């Protein structure tokens, strides 16, 4: 199994009075570290399966976060597993941009030497050769990372395969603080805690960006997403709407992705003809419906029973009238994935 390593950096305190001290960055880093450390667990107050081997580096931790210190820690993160780890780097603090590019401002930063260049961070990620590298920056001007000007006013992005960047603000924008966390990180935490999960409970960087982009209004900071990912790997797994064990059975229930599945009263547990096997399938079909993977046939107006909503026919009536159900477009995609074994047996 591929190792997963994460480093979360948060800097509240700065030595130069040019950079005012911040409030939430240390809490941002600690919250990210704690959430990324484990996937969702079904038992209340019990941590789920291990996710990232995550650690934090904050200005409250007793270690001075200088440019050299951050450079060393980034090098260790990117190279520790000799190019065989899924790596995540997170930073919350000041960010600046000048004629030389963007910088993550470290505690020893000055106007002349602000700190750790974003270009060095991306170069370290590009050279690492890891199967997946995710960089998350919550600072002003963070969208500057990866931008290269050709001297004629045109920008291009230099990014290697399997590297993904999530930046909290555009290249010329400032990042805002919120209540308990910065605006960007607060929404990141919500996204990673299920707000951006798919029916399987998986949260990818692309899904997080979509969540952030839709959450921020047109007058707020603009998140930036840059990626050369060849495969969308989950940053975290949350509670699934449809467990894999149900998805794996789709080809058994539906011979083809566009097939219809006939039902009858034996699927309804309140009916005298109920069959325990069919009732269990009925319960699993409820999960598929809740995940928008399965739908029922629409009725004409005169076919609705009295007092039933006229939106669509519920599974109950599909069973009681011996009607059929079918997969939605998303359900047909899951059928194809199940057919090739993506969800196990």
Image (spheres, rainbow, N blue to C red):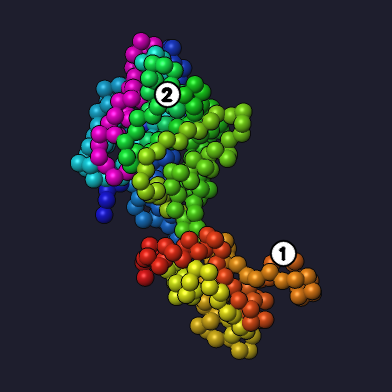
Q: Which residue lies most toward the top here?
A: 112
- In primary-sequence order, the first of circles 2 and 1 is 2
Q: Residue at x 67, y 76 (%)?
A: 317
In the rendered image, is residue 63 in sight?
A: no
In the rendered image, is residue 34 in sight?
A: yes
Q: Which label number is shown at residue 155? A: 2
Q: Residue at x 40, y 67 (%)?
A: 339
Q: Position of residue 294 (x, y in %)?
A: 56, 66
The answer to whether residue 126 is magenta is: yes
* Magenta part of the chain: 107-132
Apparent side of residue 117 relative to residue 186 in the rendered image (left or right): left
Residue of label 1: 311
Apparent side of residue 74 relative to residue 42 in the rendered image (left or right): left
Q: Quick check: 294 above or below 91?
A: below
Apparent side of residue 218 relative to residue 109 in the rendered image (left or right): right
Tell me whether circle 2 and circle 1 mark residues in contact (CB < 8 Å). no
For marks 2 and 1, give the CA distance: 50 Å
């Amino acid at each position: 199994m591929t190792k997963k390593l994460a480093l979360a950096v948060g800097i509240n305190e700065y030595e130069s009075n040019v950079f005012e001290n911040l409030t939430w960055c240390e809490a941002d880093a600690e919250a990210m570290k704690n959430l990324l450390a484990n996937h969702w667990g079904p038992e209340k107050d019990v941590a789920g399966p291990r996710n990232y081997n995550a650690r934090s580096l904050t200005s409250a931790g007793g270690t001075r976060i200088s440019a050299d210190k951050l450079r060393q820690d980034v090098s260790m993160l990117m190279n520790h597993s000799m190019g065989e780890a899924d790596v995540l780097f997170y930073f919350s603090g000041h960010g600046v941009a000048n004629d030389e590019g963007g910088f993550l401002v470290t505690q020893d930063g000055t106007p002349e030497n602000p700190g750790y260049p974003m270009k060095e961070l991306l170069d370290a990620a590009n050279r690492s050769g890891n199967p997946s590298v995710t960089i998350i920056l919550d600072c002003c001007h963070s969208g500057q990372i990866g931008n290269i000007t050709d001297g004629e006013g045109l920008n291009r992005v230099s990014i290697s395969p399997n590297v993904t960047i999530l930046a909290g603000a555009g290249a010329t924008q400032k990042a805002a603080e919120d209540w308990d966390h910065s605006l960007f990180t607060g929404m990141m935490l919500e996204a990673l805690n299920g707000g951006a999960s798919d029916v399987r409970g998986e949260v990818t960087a692309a899904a997080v960006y979509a969540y952030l982009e839709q959450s921020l209004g047109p007058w707020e900071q603009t998140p930036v997403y840059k990626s050369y990912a060849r495969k969308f790997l989950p940053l975290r797994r949350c509670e699934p709407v449809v467990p894999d064990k149900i998805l794996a059975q789709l080809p058994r229930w539906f011979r083809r992705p566009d097939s219809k599945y006939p039902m009858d009263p034996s699927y309804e547990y309140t009916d005298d003809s109920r069959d325990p096997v069919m009732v269990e399938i009925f319960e699993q079909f409820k999960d598929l419906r809740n995940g928008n993977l399965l739908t029922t046939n629409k009725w004409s107006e005169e076919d609705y029973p009295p007092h039933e909503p006229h939106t669509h026919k519920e599974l109950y009536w599909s069973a009681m009238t011996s009607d059929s159900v079918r997969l939605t477009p998303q359900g047909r995609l899951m059928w194809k994935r199940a057919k090739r074994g993506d969800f196990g047996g």
